Amino acid sequence: MEKMSRVTTALSGSALTGRTMHCHLDAPANAISVCRDAAQVVVAGRSIFKIYAIEEEQFVEKLNLRVGRKPSLNLSCADVVWHQMDENLLATAATNGVVVTWNLGRPSRNKQDQLFTEHKRTVNKVCFHPTEAHVLLSGSQDGFMKCFDLRRKDSVSTFSGQSESVRDVQFSIRDYFTFASTFENGNVQLWDIRRPDRCERMFTAHNGPVFCCDWHPEDRGWLATGGRDKMVKVWDMTTHRAKEMHCVQTIASVARVKWRPECRHHLATCSMMVDHNIYVWDVRRPFVPAAMFEEHRDVTTGIAWRHPHDPSFLLSGSKDSTLCQHLFRDASQPVERANPEGLCYGLFGDLAFAAKESLVAAESGRKPYMGDRRHPIFFKRKLDPAEPFSGLASSALSVFETESGGGSMSWFVDTAERYALAGRPLAELCDHNAKVARELGRNQVAQTWTMLRIIYCSPGLVSSANLNHSVGKGSSCGLPLMNSFNLKDMGPGLGSETRLDRSKGDTRSDTALLDSSATLITNEDNEETEGSDVPADYLLGDVEGEEDELYPLDTEHVHPEEPEYVLPQEAFPLRHEIVDTPSGPEHLQDKADSPHVSGNEADTASLAPVDSSSSLLSVSHALYDSRLPPDFFSVLVRDMLHFYAEQGDVQMAVSVLIVLGERVRKDIDEQTQEHWYTSYIDLLQRFCLWNVSNEVVKLSTSRAVSCLNQASTTLHVNCSHCKRPMSSRGWVCDRCHRCASMCAVCHHVVKGLFVWCQGCSHGGHLQHIMKWLEGSSHCPAGCGHLCEYS
Amino acid sequence: MFVARSIAADHKDLIHDVSFDFHGRRMATCSSDQSVKVWDKSESGDWHCTASWKTHSGSVWRVTWAHPEFGQVLASCSFDRTAAVWEEIVGESNDKLRGQSHWVKRTTLVDSRTSVTDVKFAPKHMGLMLATCSADGIVRIYEAPDVMNLSQWSLQHEISCKLSCSCISWNPSSSRAHSPMIAVGSDDSSPNAMAKVQIFEYNENTRKYAKAETLMTVTDPVHDIAFAPNLGRSFHILAIATKDVRIFTLKPVRKELTSSGGPTKFEIHIVAQFDNHNSQVWRVSWNITGTVLASSGDDGCVRLWKANYMDNWKCTGILKGNGSPVNGTSQLGNSNPSLSSNTPNLQNSLHGSSAGRKHS
C-alpha cells in the first residue's frame, strides 16, 4: 500500500526529474519494462528478474521476483512486459516456451500468478493489450502466436504465421482488434484478433529477420520495423497496402525500436550485435542519428521510454549487467559534431568547397539552387508545423576556379616546359630562363637567373640587353647595373667581384675557349668546350645588341648560332650524364675532383684577364684586379637555392642546380639535393609534365633519382602473327619470318611510336590508329575486336 | 581572381569532405547520406558526376585518393566504424556509355570499435599505406604489401592517442632525412585542458611510431590538421583548424645534436594564429606549393592565408561559400553577379572575391 501511494504522487507530479545514472545488475538483462507510474522498472534476464525503483539519484532494488531455491527454466526470461493499466500485473516470456504472469498484489513472497505452457519453443515476445486488462499476446520461435485471456487457464486463440519464427508481436494502439507480428523471414503480418484463421495482411518488410516493431503512439497507424538488414522502416498501415514512409540506415542489425514520446518523428533503436550504443533518429533525416547514448559496454538488450508523455528519459538494460537511465540532454549528438564543411585545394589553385547550406546562405540572403535539389518525396509531402525541423541538411558544393593568370599554377607549368636546363652554354641557359621568368612576370626569378649568369659566365657574355631590360636602366655596361641588384650580402664592390668570378668559371673550363674568343672563330671548337662557354661571335652579337636596346630579344642573337648547336645539344647531355653519374654518390671521387678543378682555376685564372682584355669589353678590364676566394659565391648561391626551396619554389632550386651543375653541387649535401629532386619530380608528375620530369630525372646526378626512370623499362613483345615471344632484337619474327610490328592501317613497319590494343595485339602508327578510331572502334586489322587503347 | 562554379551535388545530407586527386582532374565528395560521388572535369571545365554509390551504412566522414601509381583508388571512412578501399574498374563498356564508371570495394577495415573519423594514404615513397584514426583515440596504420592486390591490408601499427581523434595528416616530405611522421588532432571537447595535437614519428630502430611532439598550446577541439606539401623544405609546416586557424613550423633539430636513437626533436614555432572566422574553423587545406593556406569556418567563408617574404602571414582573400563576393575584398567589384539560375546545369559563373596575387 505504501507503494500505491508513491504511484499516485508520481502520476500527479507534473514532470519527471532525475539524472543520467546506472546501476549494476547481478546478471545480464534480456528485457526491461516500465511501470505506468514511471517510477519503477522491471529487469528480466536469464538469471535475473527484479524490480527497481527509479529515484532521483539512483536505482533502488525493490523486489526480487526470482524466488524459490532451485532455478526454474520458467524464470529464464526472454521478455518482460508490465501492464500499462494495472501496476500489479506483469508477464514474462520464458526461454522454455512458458508464458508467466505475475501479480505484485499477492501477499506471498512468490508473486507468480499464472503459467501457460502452450508454446513448444522459446517465447520471444509478450504483449498486453493497451486498453483491455485481461488480454495477453505471445509470439514464439515455434511460429505461433497465442492470445490469452488472463481470466482463463489457457489460450483463447492461436495464430499461425505459416512461416518462420515470430520475433515480435505488438497490439495496435489505433485499432482495438489489430496486432502486428514480425517474422524471421522478413515478413510482417497484420492480424485481426477475432480471426485466427488467417492474417489480414502480409508484406515483406526486410531482407532477413525482422526483429522488432513498434506502433506509433500517436494514433496514426504508423508502424516502425527493424531488421537484421540494419534498417528501420516506417510503414503507413492506414492505406490498403502498407507503404514505406521512411527508411533509416543504422550501422548494425536492429534489435529494438521504440518511438519517442511527444516527438512524432523520433525513434530509439539498439542493436543486438557489435554496436552497444542506443540511437535516437529523426526519421526524416535517416542517415545521421539525432542523439546517441554510449554508456553501455556490451549489447543493449532492452530500451524503454520512462514515461509515455516524457521524451527526455530513456531506460535501458544491457548484457553488460547494467541498468541505465539516459537523459536526452546528456546524449551526444553526432549531428552537432559532424563536420559541416569540406575544403580541398586543387592542383591549379582551384578550391573545392562544400558547406552546409545554412552556413553559406545565411548571410548572403539568397537561396542557392532553387529547384534542382531533389528532395526525397516524403519531404515535400509532409512537414509538421508542430515540430520544428529545418529540413534535411544539405550542402552546397562549389569549385572556386582561378581565372587564368591569377593564383593559378600556370606559371609553374609554363616555367617547367619552357626552361632550358642543359644542352646549351650556361650563359645562354641563364638568359633563356631569365627571359622565360620575366615573360611570366616573375621578376625576382628572372633577376636571379641574370645574376647567376653574371656570376658564372665571363663578363663579356652578359647580355647587356637582358640586363637593361630586367633592371630597367639604360646604361649598357656592367658596373652600375650590378649595384642595383639588392642582394644583401653583396657590397658595393659587387660588380668587380662578379666579373672576377665569372672569369674564373670561364677559364676553368677550357683554355681553348680563350683562343676562340680572342680570335673570334670556329664553332667546332665551341662544341667541345663546356656548356658555360659561349663563342666569341656571340659576344659580338651582344655588343651589337646594345644598339637596339629596347627590344633585345635573345633569339635574335642566338639565331645565327642555333644550327651549330643542334648537334651538341643532343650529344652533350649524354656525355654529361655518363661522366657525372658515377662520381655523384661517391664522395671520395667527388672530393678528388674538386681540388683538381680549383687547381686548374688557379692556373688559368691569371690568363683570364689578359685574354679577356683582348676581347671586346674594355670597360671590365679594370675590374679584374681584385681577387676573391673561388667559392665566394657558392655560399651565396647555396643560400639562394635554400631560400627558394624554403619558399616553396623547388622548381627554381632544382633548375638552378641542374643548370649550374658541378659549380654548386658540391656545396649542397646529397640528401638535400635528392629531396629537392624528388619533390620537383613529384610536382611535375602531378601536372602530367612527364617529359620535363623525365628530363629532370635524366639530368639529375643523385643516384636515387636517376634510377627512377630505369625501373620497369623492359618490354616483352609477342609476334602479332604467331603469338610467340619475339627474340630480343630486330623487327622480324624468328618463327614466321615476317615483320612483326606492322601498322594495321598502312601496312608498313612501325618505327617510333607504336600503339597497340592489348586485347588483340594489333596496332600501328599512333597517328594512323587515332585517325582510324575516329571512324570506327573495330580493329583496323579486321579481326573484329572492339579495340581499347588506354 | 576566382570564379565560383556551383555544382548541384545532389547529396541527400551534409557533405563532409571534398578531395581532389593527384592530378587535380577528379574530385570525390562524401556525405552523411552514406554515399561517395566521383566528379570528373570535362574539357570545358565542368564537373560531371561519373559515379555515385553507397559506401557505408553510416555517415561518410572522409574520402581520399591514393597516388595514381596504385590505380584509381579511393579510401573512405565512416561513422559505421569501418574504413573501405575502393577501386575503379575500367572497361565496363556498358557503364561507359552512360558516362558512369564502376567502383568496387577492395577491402573493409573493421578494426575500429568506434566511428572512424579520418583516413589518409601515406606519401607515395612509403608504398601503399593507409592511416585511419577513430573516435576511441587509436590511429591505425595499414599496409598493402602487394600493391597489385588492394584487397589485402595488414594492420602494421596501432598508436594510442588517449583522446578521441578527429583528423590525421601524414608528413609528405620525401626526404630521407625526415622519417615518416603523422600528426593527429583530437576533437575531444571535455573541459580538461589537454593538448589536442600529437605528432608521432617512425623510429627505424624500434620499428614503431613514438610520440615526437605534443603541441601544448592547442587545447581546444581540433577539427582538421594538415601538413603543407614539403617541396624540398628542411622544415615542416603544420596548419591546424581549431577555434581559430593556426600555423606551426617544425624545424628538426640536427640529429647530431640529439641522441641518435631517440625521436627527432623539433623547434616548434607558431607563426600565425587567426580568429577571423569568428567561429569554429572546420577545414584547412594547403595549395600545392605549401605557400597558401585555405581555411573554412562556421561563418561559411573560405579564407586564404599567405606569408610575405618576412614570413608574416596575412589574409589574401575571402570567398563566400555560395560564390557571392564579400564586401571589402572584391577587387572585381562584381556586386551584381549574373546569377544564371535559369541555366539548367546550374553552373553559375559568379565572380567571387579576389585572391589575386603574383607568385614570386
Image (cartoon, grey):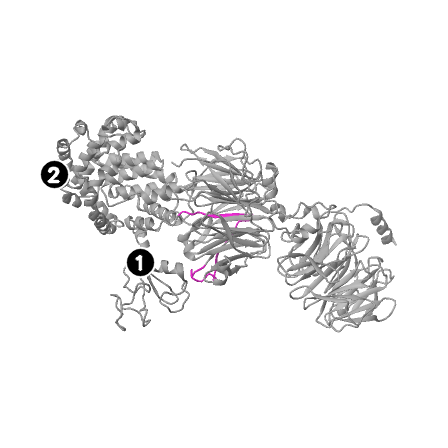
**Image mark for residue A753:** 1
* Position in image of residue A445 (x %, y %): 33, 36
The residue to which callout 2 is attached is A515
The answer to whether A769 appears left or right of A514 in the picture is right
Amino acid type for the residue under numbered disc 1: Leu
Residue A506 on the magenta span:
no
- The chain to which mark 2 is attached is A
Front-lying residue, B114 or B349: B349
The answer to whether A746 appears left or right of A507 in the picture is right
Front-lying residue, A196 or A261: A196
Where residue A244 sits, quadrant-wise, is bottom right
* Position in image of residue A738 (x %, y %): 27, 70
* Position in image of residue A434 (x %, y %): 30, 37
Q: Which residues are magenta?
A: B144-173
Residue B166 on the magenta span:
yes
Report crowding for label 2: few under 14, some 14 to 19, many 20 or more residues within 10 A (C-alpha): some
Where disc 2 sits, the SS reads helix
